[in-house]
Image (cartoon, grey):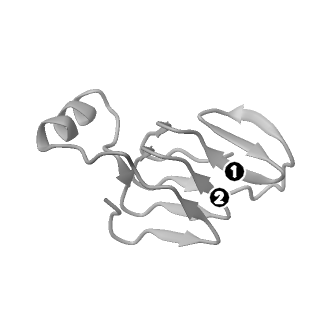
Amino acid sequence: LIGENVTIRDSIIMGSDYFDTDEQVQAHLAKGNPPVGIGTGSKILGAILDKNCQVGENVVVHNSRGVETSDEFEPCVIRDGIPIVIKDGILRDGWTMS
């Protein structure tokens, strides 16, 4: 699922191997994690999201500082200047690369 007011620009979204059931969504939320997909108000700019990523609301995945390589933002890494959210990565509400 992709929420409302999401911006995806110059990015690759790999999708998912499955869809969460209503029960799985509730279990994710109970743990403080978003369900599989991209939450409302998030921005994915010049990035790659691998399979099964859980991106919360108002998340920003963008290498605005122009970093070439970094593991500082796990589960998001930067390679050749491109932010990559690893497979099954979880970015909670409000997460940003700052």
Q: CA distance from mark 2 to mark 1?
A: 5 Å
Image disc number at residue 83: 1
Residue 6 locus on image (x, y percent):
43, 68
Secondary structure beneath label 2: loop
Secondary structure beneath label 1: strand
> In the image, 88: left or right of 80?
left
> In the image, 96: left or right of 88?
right
Q: Are marks 2 and 1 in contact (CB under 8 Å)?
A: yes
Seen from this angle, which residue lies furthest top? Answer: 31
Disc 1 residue crowd, few under 14, some 14–19, many 20+, Cα 10 Å: many
Q: In the rendered image, which quarter contains the C terminus?
A: top right
> In the image, 98: left or right of 12?
right
Which residue in the structure is indicated by mark 2? Answer: 47
Residue 48 locus on image (x, y percent):
62, 55
Q: Residue at x 75, y 54 (%)?
A: 82
Residue 4 locus on image (x, y percent):
33, 69
